[in-house]
Image (cartoon, rainbow, N blue to C red):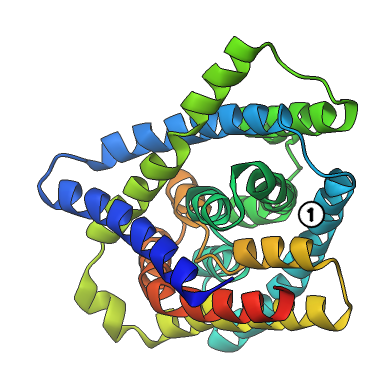
């Protein structure tokens, strides 16, 4: 993967984020409209993209790599969370900020930035297969462990797993395994609607950045700790881990691209829902996303050299 490809991809992503930033600053995208766009992405656009991916022809063994990738990512999320909990206890964070910190530092933005990035770098067909690895691992971990931290414990609500994204992931895997293909008009519909995922998701990221105070982003030292862990330390260590264990290069490259993404925007969603750590969540996501413009090319170039 050449640096020119990485930089051109990052530039396109930056320009789409800039659209969201400018429109928010002009008052055209309010917080309410941003929530509406987020709902459209997670309940319509991403599910359609997954269904469209299920109807494509992929190389033999790709589905096995996808499931192995999900298992590796889940293992890494658990390990990263343990490190985050250690840092949090040393820092003395309160319950809400600790819940946010664990999500923001340990989990990547698999949907809003991961999908646009990996489909741009690896192509939509193969990119979405590995994006599904990240979505599977993310949803399992987020809706079992992280949500309970925001809730303050309590019983696990399995109904939270029944979402359009999760249902369509199951359908996608079943289609890839069985070779079942949708009628051409249906596949074309899913593909065209799913194509809206990338620009709309990145406009939402721009909206998040525009609603953050630049001065507060650069003055809080703990935001740099969060961003360092999320953008550099965990992706770099994961990349070395995959390289030393000699996993499949294509799979290793795909899931490294995904785990290199900045802090998961779900930290802000959960913080707002449970009224815990809302201020820290917004700043952590904006800080990590902003500095990804610097750290992203570095990690992706290293991954390209290691895994080709």
Seen as rendered, the residue at the extreme left is 26
Q: Position of residue 168 (x, y in %)?
A: 69, 28
Q: Position of residue 142 (x, y in %)?
A: 67, 52
Instruction: Mark 1: give few (<14), some (14-19) or many (20+) Cα within 10 Å.
Output: many
Q: Is residue 80 above or below residue 117?
A: below
As drawn, is 69 to the left or to the right of 81? right
Residue 197 in view here: yes
Name the quadrant containing residue 141: bottom right
Name the quadrant containing residue 4: bottom left
Quick one: quadrant of the N terminus?
A: bottom right
Q: Which residue is mark 1?
A: 70
Residue 163 in view here: no
Name which residue lies at 44% across and 43% down.
Answer: 198
Name the quadrant containing residue 79: bottom right
As drawn, is 210 to the left or to the right of 232? left
Q: Position of residue 228 (x, y in %)?
A: 51, 83
As drawn, is 212 to the left or to the right of 301? left
Q: Nearer the viewer, residue 205 or 79?
A: 205
Q: Is residue 39 above or below residue 198?
A: above
Q: Position of residue 106 (x, y in %)?
A: 62, 69
Q: Is residue 301 above or below residue 250?
A: below
Name which residue lies at 69% across and 53% down.
Answer: 134
């Amino acid at each position: 993967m050449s640096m020119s490809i990485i930089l051109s991809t990052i530039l396109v992503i930056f320009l789409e984020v800039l659209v969201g930033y400018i429109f928010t600053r002009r008052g055209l995208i309010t917080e309410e409209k941003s929530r509406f766009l987020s709902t459209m992405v997670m309940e319509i656009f991403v599910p359609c993209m997954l269904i469209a991916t299920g109807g494509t022809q992929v190389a033999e063994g790709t589905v096995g790599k996808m499931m192995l990738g999900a298992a590796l990512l889940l293992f890494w999320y658990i390990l990263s969370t343990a490190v985050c909990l250690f840092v949090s206890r040393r820092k003395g964070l309160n319950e809400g900020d600790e819940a946010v910190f664990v999500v923001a530092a340990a989990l990547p933005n698999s949907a809003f930035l991961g999908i646009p990035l990996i489909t741009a770098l690896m192509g939509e067909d193969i990119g979405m297969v590995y994006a599904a690895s990240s979505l599977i691992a993310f949803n399992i971990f987020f809706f079992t462990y992280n949500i309970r931290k925001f809730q303050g414990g309590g019983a696990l609500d399995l109904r939270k797993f029944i979402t359009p994204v999760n249902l369509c992931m199951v359908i996608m895997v079943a289609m890839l395994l069985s070779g079942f293909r949708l009628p051409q008009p249906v596949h074309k519909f899913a593909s065209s609607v799913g194509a809206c995922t990338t620009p709309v998701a990145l406009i939402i990221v721009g909206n998040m950045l525009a609603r953050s105070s630049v001065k507060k982003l650069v003055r809080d030292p703990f935001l740099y700790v969060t961003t360092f862990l999320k953008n550099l330390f965990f992706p770099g260590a994961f990349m070395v881990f995959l390289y030393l264990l000699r996993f499949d290069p294509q799979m290793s490259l795909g899931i490294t691209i995904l785990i290199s993404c900045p802090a998961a925007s779900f930290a802000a969603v959960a913080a707002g829902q449970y009224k815990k750590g809302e201020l820290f969540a917004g700043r952590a996501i904006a800080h990590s996303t902003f500095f990804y413009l610097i750290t992203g090319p570095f990690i992706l170039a290293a991954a390209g050299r290691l895994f080709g």
